[in-house]
Amino acid sequence: MAAVIGLLLIAPLGMAQLRITGVISGTVQDPTGAAVPGAKVSLKDQGTGIVKETKSGESGTFVFPDLANGSYEMTVTAQGFSTVVLKGISVQTSQTTDVPVKLELGQQAQTVTVEGTAPVLETVAQLVTTTQSRETITQLPVLNRSNVLALARLAPGASPPGGGSTRYNNLPGGAVNVTVDGINNASNGFKSGGTVFFATVPVRLGAVEEVSVETGGMGADSGAQSGANIKFVTRRGGAQYHGSLFYEPRSEQFNANTWVRNANAATGKRVYFRQHDYGGNIGGRVVPFGYLKDKLFFFANYERIYGPRTADRRVTVLTPAAQRGEYTYLVNGTTDQTRTVNVLNLARTGGFRNTIDPVSQAIMNINNEIPKYAVQVPDNNFNTDEYAWSAENNLWQQFPATRFDYHATASQQITFSWNYYHSWQAGERRLPVPDVNRTNPFRLGYFVWSAALQSTLKPTVFNEFRYGIQHSGDTNAFAPNGLHYTFNNRPLRIGQTLPFGGTGTPLRGPVVPYIDQQNVTGRHWIATMYDTMTWIRNKHTYTMGFSFRSTDWKDTGEVFPIPTYTLGTPTGDPVPGLLFTAANMPGAINTEFGNSTAAALYNSLIGRVAQANFTRVVNPDTYQYDGFHNWTWTRSLMGGAFVQDRWRIKPSLTLNYGVRWEVQGPMYDVKAITAVPDQASVFGPSSGLFSPGTLSGNNNPTAEVGRQAFNTDFNNFAPNVGFAWNPHFDKGPLAR
């Protein structure tokens, strides 16, 4: 039987300690159930061989906080009692493993060994958590090695079961917090719209030691930032060397085709998909001899993805005849009779410009190379040809990860971990012509690193300090000045949906060989720092500490420092109405006259400019509209302090209570170029919520340029209380 009873009031915002260490606690008793104070308790990490020691207190209790997850062996000795050895004690992230020790009368030389002492449920805290160990993870049917986050959906209360909007216990999306080694790894700029259930740096299958999901009963040390914590822990090395290699190919040839695709001759083949995942890892001692032999351990994992990527593309270009100015149309009232007029000759007769623009001619020369590298597709347009080809844009991704554990002294341990994600796609060629540059290249460079110092200040006082950074950076800065087309070594920007032609007409003109794009960079930094002290005093285990987080969201985008030209017919221009008439185009329907598809062909060939635009943005240095770099740089600061007590009233009853104080700073504009309305301007003249027609008189709401929209919120106090009652230790009922 399991029942969850308690009270947990949590502040909705702020940064809390998201600790990844576990705890072993217990009570030493004699055969009559009386406490045995002063018993020597030794704890050995079965992975590294590192030993920690403590003594039981007056009530027989002992605690080993700040333990890395793994398997441990405990040895308990006391005068007049046999030595007890307990093996296979499991420690999991953020959980307390309660180990009751029963001593038997006898000599210390006599040893009683107990195997497999890990309890099934948390018996001294009200925390509701689900943990998947590395052994379990490697046996689960994960679709691919990058989908480890999906394992968090196995926790109770998760819904929906797929997509990027999974949440827990029907809490809002902002309540889900993903961390790696205690450091924030969530999308802090987008907490909805598909990035609720999201990890900035994907933790790969070969690098993860444990996945833990906390969905309720969190104490003051971990419950301020979120209502659900998803914690990833990077693997660590031990006293022995272990490693592995893998190669996982994926191909559509390994898949069964669908019935529908088999039945359709046009799409009967399987959907093309190829991907190659490969990599390996190794862990152990950094130095296998000397002073550092049993002090410094490492683990390294490297995985890479190569994915050949192609996409079916089509492009429509002018026929050779249309490039000479010949416009063909269907004679009205017929289905098979066509006529052709030369728009350049009509312009020459009318006394207007009638020569092909050199820019248009240069682009058409590139268009004329397309038939060499693409397949023509039948269409029903007299003035254009359509071509199809497979555009290549291969994907390269790499995922290195490492962790170091340095046991400097018996009371000082330093841990450092680093997880990195790099993705690169060179971009597609706009046209299937070899010398056409690639467009829309995209690079991602994300990482999370975490460093911690764990100290034993006194036999009953322990401390953990942790600091780390999440960085997410993406860039599309491949093109100088964001420009992809030049003519005579001068940048030229034709700002229409490509290929450029008459806007709103079915005719497309010469296809610009480069997609117009801006160079954009994003640099996002989230710094996390926290400190937690544990003090053991008789039946009480006090934890207290503070936390701080700084979030910087910095995007820059270059606007084009040259005009944007829009081709077409200028407003009020009489030329189309004079040239494209019933007299010059006999048999054409009315929609062919005036500013129509024939006019679009004429405009494209001679390069007629309908509009020119020039953009400038606010310069944060001068606060004037004289800049070409658009800044979006916001920052928020938050932090808090807490105290929590775990009172072991009896070996079977534990009371947990505490309080947390959170300070939530406003998100503000670092460059101070944001226009921010005050509350009165937000509502404007509407001030009477339940009094229709009642106006405030504020008929001109304003926004003032400044740094922040609201003040820091200091009034966030979050008390919590809970208990765990286990009257028969590992048997019978458990109430939390």
Image: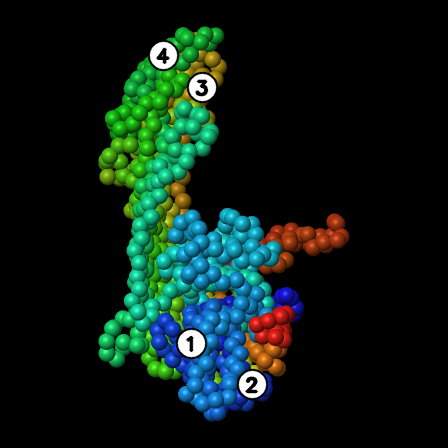
Q: Which residue is mark 4?
A: 340
Nearer the camera: disc 3 or disc 1: 1
Between marks 2 and 3, how big is the CA–CA gap? 105 Å
The secondary element bearing badge 1 is classed as strand
Between marks 4 and 1, how big is the CA–CA gap? 92 Å
Q: Which residue is mark 2?
A: 31
Mark 1 is on which residue type? Glu
Q: Position of residue 547 (x, y in %)?
A: 49, 72
Q: With respect to residue 568, does 88 lie above or below?
A: below
Does residue 125 appear in this view? no
Q: Residues within 10 Å of mark 1 (few under 14, many from 20)?
A: many
Q: Residue at x 55, y 60 (%)?
A: 175
Q: With respect to residue 251, does 735 lie above or below?
A: below
The secondary element bearing badge 4 is classed as strand
Between marks 4 and 2, how big is the CA–CA gap? 109 Å
Between marks 3 and 1, how big is the CA–CA gap? 90 Å
Q: Residues within 10 Å of mark 3 (few under 14, many from 20)?
A: some
Circles 2 and 3: CB atoms closer than 8 Å: no
Q: Which mark is residue 222?
A: none
Q: Residue at x 40, y 61 (%)?
A: 208
Q: Residues within 10 Å of mark 4 (few under 14, many from 20)?
A: some
Q: Which residue is mark 3?
A: 594
* In the displayed structure image, the side of residue 140 where residue 242 appears, left or right: left
Mark 2 is on which residue type? Pro
Q: With respect to residue 647, does 730 lie above or below?
A: above
Q: Position of residue 615 (x, y in %)?
A: 40, 44
Q: Which residue is mark 1?
A: 73
